[in-house]
Amino acid sequence: MVFAFQVRMVRITDRVVNTYYARIYLRKASDNTNISIDARPSDALNVAERFNAPIYVSKDIVVKDAIKVVYGNWRARSTKVVYDVSLDSAPDEADPLFEELDLVQKMNAAILEERFEDAAVWRDQLAKLRMPRHEM
C-alpha cells in the first residue's frame, strides 16, 4: 500500500491543566514538503506505533510530569538522574528538531540527485543549526 504522506515523528507538545496536546509531523511523498497537524495524544501515539515513527516529549512536560529514574548509590554524590524519554525543545521556542529534519531531507535529496553544491549549502546550514548557542 502506498501512502501520500510519510509519518516522520510525533511530539507530545504541551499540557494545559490535565489535557495533553500532540502534533504529528508528516512528509508529503509527491513533493517532499513537511507539514505538521494537531492530534490527540492517544491518536498521535497510535499513528507513531503503526508507522514505526519516533515519539518525542517536550522538556517542560518531562520536567513536570515524568518519573525520574535514578542510577547509582543513593547516598553517593555521583547519583545520576535521567528521564527515559527523548527530549525536544520547549514549546515556546522555535522547533529546531523539525528544522533539522527538513534540512537533512533536503540534503539527502540533493545528494541523490547529484546536486552537490546544493547539498553543501544544506550541510552548512545543518552544521550551524546543530552548533551549541554559546559557540555561535
Image: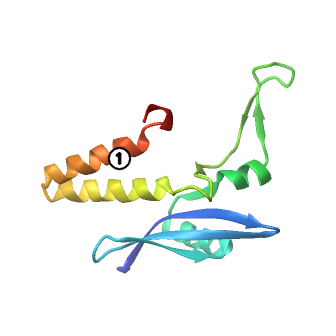
- Residue 72 horizontal side relative to residue 51, left or right: right
Q: Position of residue 118 (x, y in %)?
A: 18, 53
Secondary structure of the residue carrying numbered label 1: helix
Q: Amino acid at mark 1?
A: Leu
Work out which quarter of the rendered image holds the C terminus and state it.
top left
Residue at image x 64%, y 55%? 58
**Residue 21: where, in percent of width, then height?**
67, 70
Q: What is the count of numbered marks? A: 1
Query: Where does label 1 land, which residue?
Result: 126
Q: Is residue 119 above or below residue 74?
A: below
Give the quarter of the figure containing the N terminus. Answer: bottom left
Give x and y (percent) for residue 9: 50, 63
User: Considering only vertical position in the picture, is 132 above or below 2?
Assistant: above
* Residue drawn at 76 percent across, 40 percent down: 69
Q: For this rendering, which residue is in front, 93 or 62? A: 93
Instruction: Say which residue appears at 62% left-offset and 59% top-offset.
Output: 91
| 114 w.r.t. 81: above or below | below
- The residue at 48%/54% (across/down) is 97
Where in the figure is residue 56, as x and y percent of width and height? 59, 57
